[in-house]
Image (tube, grey):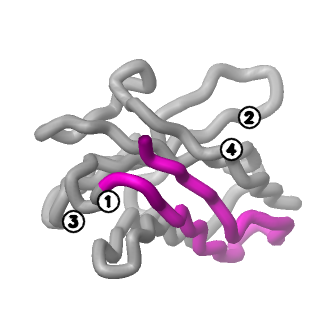
Amino acid sequence: QVQLVESGGGLVQAGGSLRLSCAASGRTFSNYVMGWFRQAPGKEREFVATISWSGGSTYYADSGKGRFTISRDNAKNTLYLQMNSLKPEDTAVYYCAAANRVVLIITEGEYDYWGQGTQVTVSS
């Protein structure tokens, strides 16, 4: 089992920045591909970004390319999502997820463990 706890969400004005964190406990964090997803009100949960075990490989949804950066600190068992130039359409609950896989994963169903989510609200 892997337990994931997100933090860092909040209310920010358009153009602002937030850094989300996801603290992992349980099994060895560095064994898992990690991802961020988000779910806006009335919408399906969607992929945001994913990162490999080592942090050497990343992949982003088009919505976040150039604005979001996913990273991880395996020594601290923590995943991050730096979000810059935020837009009102980024408003959502953001979830981190862990996958016991060897390749980057963009599909929600491929992830094994999920956090409870953190709310991000971007005002215009």
Q: Main secondary structure of the magenta part?
A: strand
Tag 2 residue:
40
Type of amino acid under label 2? Ala
How far is disc 4 from disc 3 in space, using C-alphas? 23 Å
| Residue 5 highlighted magenta (yes or no) | yes
N-terminal label among 4 and 1: 1
Q: In the image, which disc is placed on residue 116? A: 4
How far is disc 1 from disc 3 in space, using C-alphas? 12 Å
Dot 3: what SS? loop
Q: In the image, which disc is placed on residue 122? A: none
Q: In the image, which disc is placed on residue 55? A: 3
Label 4 crowding class (10 Å Cα cut-off): few <14, some 14-19, many 20+?
Answer: some
Which label lies toward us, 2 or 1?
1
Label 1 crowding class (10 Å Cα cut-off): few <14, some 14-19, many 20+?
Answer: many
Type of amino acid under label 3? Gly
* Above/below status of 14 relative to 45: below
For image coordinates 75% across by 48% down, the residue present is: 91
* Above/below status of 34 relative to 84: above
Tag 1 residue:
29
How far is disc 2 from disc 1 in space, using C-alphas? 28 Å
- 6 on left or right of 60: right
For image coordinates 32% across by 59% down, the residue present is: 29
